[in-house]
Image (tube, grey):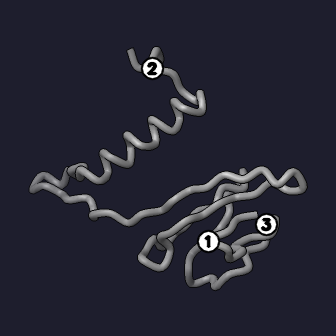
Amino acid sequence: MWFKSNNTITTGREIIVDAALGYHLDNDMNLIIDKVSDKTKGEYHCAIMPQDVRMKIFLEIGEEPKVDHNGQAMVSASALCLMLALLVRELSFGIVSLDKFF
């Protein structure tokens, strides 16, 4: 099950919120948000039942990527912070280790 704050988004494979928000599930039951906006930012969590195992995710909206005159995307400071936060999270869960990078 997927929730946003205390509102249920999915029960199994069934999406039970407004389709205009652009939520869907991939084959691995990951929640995909097609239309990220201020309406979709906030606290999400998934729960695996009946064990009630939960994981929280916070979606924040930052700056749009900027494109230089050659059409190359320029990474903003907020994107770099997000990538660093994800790396720290994966290190803390033991998903990756620093020896993979060096």
Q: Are marks 3 and 1 in contact (CB under 8 Å)?
A: no
Task: Give the CA distance from mark 3 to mark 2.
Answer: 36 Å
Above-or-below relation of 5 to 17: above
For the view shown, which residue lies furthest in the right direction? 50
> Residue 63, position in %: x, y?
27, 63
Considering every residue shown, the one lying at the far left of the view is: 69
Question: Disc 3 vs disc 2: which is toward the camera?
Answer: 2
Q: For the point 30% across and 45% down, which residue is it?
A: 80
- Confirm or deny contact between disc 2 and disc 1 (CB under 8 A): no
**Mark 3: amino acid:** Arg
The one of 54 and 77 positioned closer to us in this rendering? 54
> Badge 2 is on which residue?
98
User: Where is residue 71 drawn, in percent x and y?
Assistant: 18, 55
Residue 25 picture location, percent across and down:
68, 62
At label 2, counting other C-alpha atoms closer than 10 Å, the crowd grade (few under 14, some 14-19, many 20 or more) is: few
Please give left or right for residue 10 compared with residue 84 in the image: right
74 on left or right of 54: left
Looking at the image, which is closer to me, 40 or 85? 85
User: Given the image, on which type of amino acid does mark 2 rest?
Assistant: Leu
Task: Name the residue located 51 percent from the left edge and 39 percent from the top edge.
Answer: 89
Disc 3 crowd rating (10 Å Cα; few below 14, some 14-19, many 20+) is: few
Q: Nearer the viewer, residue 11 or 4?
A: 4
Give the CA distance from mark 2 to mark 1: 33 Å
The residue pinned by badge 1 equals 5
Q: Is residue 98 above or below residue 47?
A: above
In the image: residue 66, left or right of residue 52: left
Find residue 23 and report its image quarter: bottom right
Q: Give x and y (percent) for residue 22.
A: 57, 75
Q: Which residue, given by chain and number where applicable, does mark 3 sit on?
A: 13
Q: Which mark is residue 49?
A: none
